[in-house]
Amino acid sequence: MEHSTALYRRLRTDPSRPLPELRSELGWDEAEFDTALGELRQLGLLRPTPATGSGLTAVSVATAVRHLLADADGHLADLFTAVRRTRDTVEHLHTRYLPAQTDTDDGGTRHLVHGADRIAALLEDAAHSARTEVLSLRPGQDHSRTALDGKLARERIALAHGVRLRTVYPAAALHHPDVLDHVQRLTGAGAGIRVAHTLPLWLIAVDSTMAVLPAPGGAPDTALVVRDEAVLAVVRELFEYFWTAAWVPPDLLGRPVPDDRHREVLRLLAAGLTDQAIARKLEISERTVRRLVSDLTTDLGAQSRFQAGVHAARLGWI
């Protein structure tokens, strides 16, 4: 990471230097140089161009974020198409191969569960049986205190067994005080909580053995339990996509919005300025800049300055 940051800064200030010459000047071996280049390309911070001696141009963090979000939107559209196709396939399998009103598991890989009480009992059993992880997407769920308390009790059972619990909520749901209190208590109990702008459907996956999905046709108070390996693989891939694209809401980290100083640091980071340049611009020490950047990455649940920029852009902070 240090090598890629140093290379990024050099390419921003002097893109005309041929890459072999730049590597020699930096004193790195070929593997170190290629690794740094690869990291920058993966983050979208480098673009090919015939206009420079290096054949590359180092774009600003803000530009990389815009390209990343545009790519994500395209991927999201493809994913929604895949989701619709998967749901149509599941509905076809259910309609053609399962009895229309079955609500007991006859040894097959899919069955329906009818009624809110029976679904709640199913989820409690799943919480007791989980051994490694429980994954869930939670759009459009019941926000009543009774429903949220029931979810919290089930999820604490899994957490008490040492199960890793990861949940993605729609960001708008946290505007509801009871939901915010619920996820804050879950976070305090050790669960991983993130939010996304939109989610295509609700789902719960337990270990690699079972998933609970909306019933085909959207039947109310009915859930489809799936144990088919192929469908489970799609469900887990779908969850991981949204988990990777989601972010930790600042509400869970004690800072709803950044103050003016932190917001200005974000803006300058997105413009590609170094800590030294930011310090000069704001007339503060580099040590203070590093502390402010550390505050921002922590508050945004980010693992790097670039990821902090992505999350901040999604939140409309820059």
Image (tube, grey):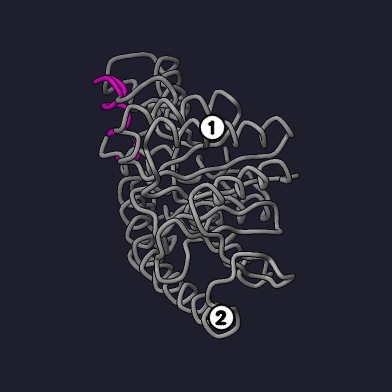
Number of residues whose C-alpha sits closer than 10 Å to that of mark 2, classed few (under 14), some (14–19) or many (20 or more): few
Q: Which mark is residue 152?
A: 1
Q: Which residue is mark 2?
A: 93
Q: Residue flagged by tag 2: what amino acid is it?
A: Leu
Q: Residue 1, image x and y in percent?
A: 58, 41
Q: Residue at x 38, y 14 (%)?
A: 285
How far is mark 1 from mark 2, CA to CA?
Answer: 33 Å
Whether residue 227 is visible to the viewer of this picture, yes or no, is yes
Q: Residue at x 53, y 28 (%)?
A: 187
**Which of 226 and 185 lies nearest the eye of the viewer?**
226
Q: Which mark is residue 122?
A: none
The first of marks 1 and 2 along the sequence is 2
Q: Residue 226, image x and y in percent?
A: 62, 65
Horizontal side of 242 relative to 140 (left or right) equals right
- The quadrant holding residue 220 is bottom left
Whether residue 318 is visible to the viewer of this picture, yes or no, is no
Residues under numbered marks 1 and 2 in contact, where contact means CB atoms less than 8 Å apart? no
Prevalent SS, magenta region: helix
**155 drawn magenta:** no
Q: Residue 295, image x and y in percent?
A: 43, 22
**259 drawn magenta:** yes
**Which of 303 and 315 lies nearest the eye of the viewer?**
315
Circle 2 sits in a helix, a strand or a loop, which is it?
helix
Q: Residue flagged by tag 1: what amino acid is it?
A: Leu
Residue range of the region highlighted in magenta in the rendering: 258-272
Q: Residue 271, image x and y in percent?
A: 29, 40
Circle 1 sits in a helix, a strand or a loop, which is it?
helix
**Which of 205 and 108 lies nearest the eye of the viewer?**
108
- The quadrant holding residue 131 is top right
